[in-house]
Image (cartoon, grey):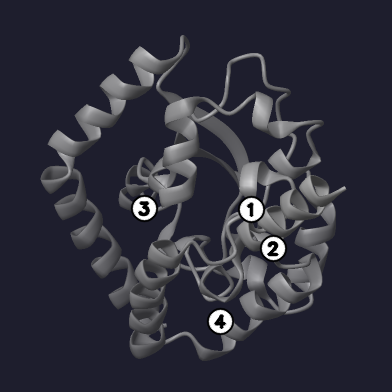
Amino acid sequence: MMYLKFKRLVDILLSFIGIVLLSPFILLLVIAIKIDSKGPVLFKQKRVGIHKEHFHILKFRTMRIDTPKDTPTHLLEDPAQYITKVGKFLRKTSLDELPQIWNIFVGQMSIIGPRPALWNQDDLIAERDKYGANDVKPGLTGWAQINGRDELPIEVKAKLDGEYVERMNFFFDVKCFIGTFISVAKSDGVVEGGTGATAKEEMASNKETASK
């Protein structure tokens, strides 16, 4: 309980510093998004928070405004057609998640924790119930994110989220925080266009097609 209070203080402090220091960079991203495609800069989506209470997560919009709502990208038919040029860059670098600094500041999320499930991802929510992972604040990044990100099966992702709940402490949070930068830099586990194939798998598929 004491650590959770300390964790919240760290969240407030770091998110406030992030908002202040990153404001010029955020402004540049806003301009790029507006120039690239029509529509709002921010994308709001209903997600599952602590104790399965719903909240609206904030992201930079990376897809066209005619994209089907509340559908995970990998479940869309030809998802690449909906992703904007700037959006592709934002997704690859995870910069589309930057507005969640506000979700952290107001207490809906934490810097480190299980990534918030979509409100209709019943399978993931049910799996997380087995490990108590729905009873902690969701995070901007977490243990599952540095161990596979998009390519993880739901059962594995939920188990890793449960492992985070069991091991949650200051040093483990620092490990997740540092691991996130390494994972993003290497693009580990990032699904190309949300199709369910990693970059390596996508390249192998393209080579196989070219050889036929």
Q: Position of residue 135 (x, y in %)?
A: 61, 69
* Label 1 with label 3: CB-CB less than 8 Å: no
Q: Position of residue 125 (x, y in %)?
A: 76, 60
In front: 77, or 129? Answer: 77
Foreground label between 1 and 3 = 1
Q: Counting residues from the N terminus, which is met first, the one under dot 2 or under dot 1?
A: 2
Residue assigned mark 2: 151
In front: 141, or 11? Answer: 141
Residue assigned mark 4: 164
- Distance from disc 4 to disc 3, alpha carbons, whole Å, reads 18 Å
- Is residue 78 visible in the rendered image? The answer is yes
Q: Counting residues from the N terminus, which is met first, the one under dot 1 or under dot 3?
A: 3
Residue assigned mark 3: 104
* Label 4 with label 3: CB-CB less than 8 Å: no
**Residue 4 versus residue 149 in the image, above or below:** below
* Label 1 with label 4: CB-CB less than 8 Å: no
Which residue appears farthest toward the top when viewing the image?
A: 38
In front: 4, or 150? Answer: 150
- Distance from disc 4 to disc 2, alpha carbons, whole Å, reads 18 Å
